[in-house]
Amino acid sequence: MALFTREEALRYHEAPRPGKLEVVPAKPCRNQKDLSMAYSPGVAEACKAIKEDPAAADLYTGRSNLVAVVSDGSAVLGLGNIGPLAGKPVMEGKGVLFKTFADIDVFDINLKVTGPDQLIEVVKTMEPTFGGINLEDIKAPECFYVEETLKREMNIPVFHDDQHGTAVISGAGLINALEITNRKAEDMKVVVVGAGAAGIACASFYVALGVDPANIYMFDSRGLIHTGRSGLNEYKARFAQKKDAGSLQDVMKGADMFLGLSTKDLVSKDMVRAMAKDPVLFAMANPDPEISYPDAKEASPNCIMGTGRSDFPNQVNNVSGFPYIFRGALDVGASEINEAMKVAAARSLAALAKEPVPAEICAMYGVDKLEFGVDYVIPKPLDPRVLEWETPAVAQAAMDSGIATKPIADMKAYAASLRARVDASAKRISTLVESYDL
């Protein structure tokens, strides 16, 4: 049942002021002295300090806490290539999540560009303004080229959430699924349906977690990806099987894991029954998964089933990743978001799922308890403890990787400070929003 009507959704975006974001000054401008310091002549002192030492920009501007959510609108949610203007509400929404969950400021940058090379050149020019770049809703395979190039040519974190967010969260689930089912990553047969940004990134991340790429069977709209096919781009070719192993129904036989990033109703109960005992199914087509939760459980009662939906267990939700990954990266001045940071994020989420869940979090989801097991392998997206577990893990991984320019000396104190920071931000936001005439 829908939580809202179309009219309610449009009204939410329209009133009491259009859009979901507002730029608010962080310093007073109430008198002549304030005005003189905010702009001319006082601002010149900050400019001269930064000219002398570029690192001073972190002290005298908001750059170190400012992320650009950048999109060309070519692959917006399930809406497709609707363009940058129609995609703007999604990018504003991403800004809301960054601020709400991690107190990170965002400008959404919606670009009308002629292709990936122009997109790259435009984004590169914005490095003096932003502490990080979150690429969003850019179609594959261009998204891989764009991210790889920007990561190589910029000195700030660049992260394509459509790829890596899904990979990190589902990767956390995979880590725990391996433990629960007593499997080894290198022995897993994994079937992936959907060879777009998320599918290829997830497969790559699973390899980083120990899955043998030879055991990954990836399907696109034309069927199984194998070396006998023509026209494969370099990203799909990385996961090409040496020979055609048949249809999805054929390949699902004996599979340990199914990852779906495609369309609804692709997987039948018989296909699940043909998988290995107690399989892992992450069926993430939205709003309707490749196989429904009830059907998967009927076919294999002890399967570990995850979807993108909040009304079933094991929701794979990117909001459990990107705000905290960026928070950790920004706080240590990381020059990039590397594989070690993503793995640390996934392992921290997997570890948190084993911790006792407070009653208030259970109440939030309308359940009496949440316990580590087949129906709870990933922490709930609204669990506030994710901030204090994932963010320090990411920051520590950046320091251990040697890419942090502002290392944190006391990680325990840092972890404790995060909740106070986000709570204070939430209080400010609440005061502002409540001041509107709703």
Image: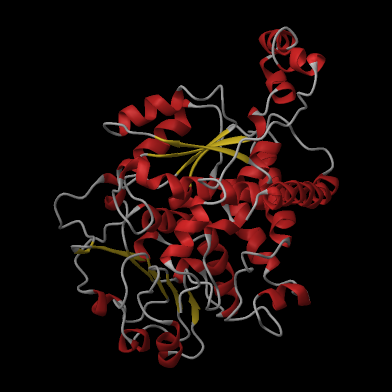
Residue 142 point in image, percent of width and height: 31, 41
Residue 167 seen in the figure: no
Residue 139 point in image, percent of width and height: 32, 47
Q: Quadrant of the C terminus?
A: bottom right
Residue 10 point in image, percent of width and height: 45, 57
Toward the viewer: 177 or 315?
A: 315
Residue 344 seen in the figure: yes
Residue 76 lies left or right of residue 421; in this view the side is: left
x 40%, y 70%: residue: 287
Toward the viewer: 14 or 143?
A: 14
Work out whether 361 lies above or below 434: below
Work out whether 271 lies above or below 9: below
Residue 425 point in image, percent of width and height: 74, 46
| Quadrant housing residue 26 | top right
x 69%, y 80%: residue: 371
x 31%, y 43%: residue: 83
| Quadrant housing residue 369 | bottom right
Work out whether 191 lies above or below 305: above
Work out whether 246 lies above or below 74: below
Toward the viewer: 124 or 311?
A: 311
Residue 201 lies left or right of residue 422; in this view the side is: left
| Quadrant housing residue 65 | top right
Q: How many marks?
A: 0
